[in-house]
Image (tube, rainbow, N blue to C red):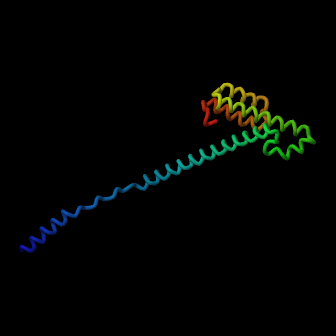
């Protein structure tokens, strides 16, 4: 009997000494699915923003390359083949000069906005491009810049 009591005490203290593990919190499957959906949505937004910034950078690079080529007296990128055709076709040469003028005005507008901090002066350049060179690809860029100015965006987003 004494042995049984000793065994009971021993078993009792053993149970008291060994702490019971806390049950792991159970996360509902819907919570996990919601978190996954939120992360996927964030990734999609970031990918869209990266694509937008890449397109903007490509556009700026093309403007800069065109202006630099014109300053050097060279044909802008993508117009080298057209230059030989322009020697025979005065209309093609005229259209090339229209494109060149529009891109230079766009560059001036960008400089007035970014370097000089003069959004109204930049707006006038962009509006001039839209009015006088509305059929060029640079007029589409100027329209986008005008929309950004209307939204109050300046500097980094332009």
Q: Is residue 35 left or right of residue 137?
A: left
The residue lying at 56 percent from left, 47 percent from top is 46
Say whether residue 25 is left or right of residue 145.
Answer: left
Q: How far across and how far down the image is residue 2, in percent?
A: 6, 73
Seen in the picture, residue 70 relative to 40 is either above or below; the reply is above
Which corner quadrant of the image does residue 124 belong to? top right
Q: Residue at image x 46%, y 51%?
A: 35
Which percent across, then down, holds residue 94?
A: 87, 36
Q: Nearer the viewer, residue 33 or 119?
A: 119
The quadrant holding residue 93 is top right
The C terminus lies in quadrant: top right
Q: Nearer the viewer, residue 73 or 87?
A: 73
Res 26 quadrant in image = bottom left
At x 16% / y 69%, what residue is drawn? Answer: 11
Q: Residue furthest front?
A: 72
Which residue is pictured at 72% across the width and 31% down the height? 108
- Residue 129 pos. (x, y %): 75, 31
Quick one: quadrant of the N terminus? bottom left
């Amino acid at each position: 009997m004494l042995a049984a009591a000793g065994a009971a005490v021993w078993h009792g203290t053993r149970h008291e000494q060994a702490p019971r593990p806390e049950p792991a919190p159970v996360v509902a499957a819907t919570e996990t699915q919601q978190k996954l959906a939120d992360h996927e949505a964030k990734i999609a937004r970031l990918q869209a923003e990266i694509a937008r910034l890449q397109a903007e950078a490509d556009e700026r690079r093309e403007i800069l390359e065109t202006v630099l080529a014109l300053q050097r007296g060279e044909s802008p990128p993508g117009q080298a083949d057209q230059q030989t055709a322009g020697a025979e076709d005065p209309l093609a040469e005229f259209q090339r000069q229209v494109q060149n003028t529009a891109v230079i005005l766009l560059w001036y507008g960008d400089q007035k906005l970014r370097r000089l901090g003069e959004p109204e002066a930049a707006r006038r350049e962009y509006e001039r491009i839209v009015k006088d060179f509305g059929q060029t690809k640079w007029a589409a860029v100027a329209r986008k810049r005008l929309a950004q100015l209307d939204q109050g965006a300046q500097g980094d987003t332009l």
